[in-house]
Image: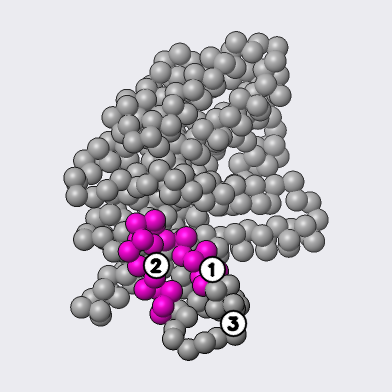
Amino acid sequence: MSSDVLEKRYRTLLRAYPAEYRRERADELIDTLIGDEPTARRWPTLRQAAALIRGGLRVHSGSTAARPTAVRLWQGIHLGAMAVLALGTLFGLRGVLEALRSGGLSDPLVVLRDHGVYEVMVGAALVALAAGRARTAAVLTVAAAVVPTVISPYLFSDGLPQWWVPVVADGLPQWWAPVVATPLVMVGLRRPADVPPAPRVNAVLVTAGVLALHLLLAEGFRNVDNMTSQILAAVVVICGTAAFLWVATADQRLLLAVTPTFLLGTLYQLNTLYGAYGALSTGHVDGAEVAKHFYQPYAPPSLVVAAVITAGIVGSTRLRQHNRA
């Protein structure tokens, strides 16, 4: 009876693997895990559970494909484009809400013109890319960078209305998301025929993981005003980042997917510096307010860390493959 319970729990863990892989190898894996000897265990060991989950992540990343490096590269580019567009959509929505809250209710048509057109277009590009319509996504991504700028070039204007100042200083400038995503989508159009696209559900989960990481890094210390809360926030951020890296070292497509989103964060900080000092020169805000909004320490260091981690993981993977050969 205990063996039946143990087998059931092993099969639950095996759901970390793709369905096709489970159909071919599940029974073999179960036989290896349980063995021929009777056992009184009812639960897999922690080490076995971690190994099975990481094994499933590796299979999802293409480790069993004929060309695993090509699968990781091209699917990582696709996932990176999705993550950038998703981040742009998320912060675009935040921009709409901030604009309305900061005085935009007095002129909602202006808010819709300056934020709504972008939000619809970049959201449509994200949906098209997730649905596998890469060419449609490419057109919508380029349009999301060009059309809102033509309709309202407020991102490049020094004469911003006063209620826009906190939006520009505190929100992610939406314009950078389609700009960063465009080359990724365009390169993705050249994906080799023998490299399969990332499964839709898996792509959505990866994108959600990247968004969760950014929300932890960007929002982890926001509105934290005492030492105890800061310590708890730091623990949450460190644990969340460690969990992401644990997954990303097994599914290395995440490393490729997350790197352009950190580039987006760096461009955000550079753009914020320009916008904040422009607001300071017009007298809309004082120096303390500029420093408060500009202080976003996670963006440039995170880009460097992401690049170093990616290089280290790729190097260790190549070394491991060489040693096995």
> How far apart are the alpha carbons under marks 3 and 1?
12 Å
Q: Is residue 37 above or below residue 224?
A: below
Residue 166: give x, y in percent of width and height.
65, 30
Number of the label disc, if any, that sits on residue 89 = none
Q: Amino acid at mark 2?
A: Ala
> How far apart are the alpha carbons under marks 3 and 2?
20 Å
* SS type, badge 3: loop
Residue designated by label 2: 26
Residue designated by label 1: 8
Residue designated by label 3: 41
The residue at the point 27 percent across, 48 percent down is: 196
Q: Amino acid at mark 3?
A: Arg
Quadrant location, the C terminus = bottom left
Q: Is residue 96 above or below residue 208?
A: above
For the residue pair 157 and 99, the one nearer the viewer reads as 99
Query: Do labels 2 and 1 touch, CB within 8 Å?
Result: no
Q: Is residue 15 above or below residue 28?
A: above
Q: Earlier in the sequence, mark 3 or mark 1?
A: 1
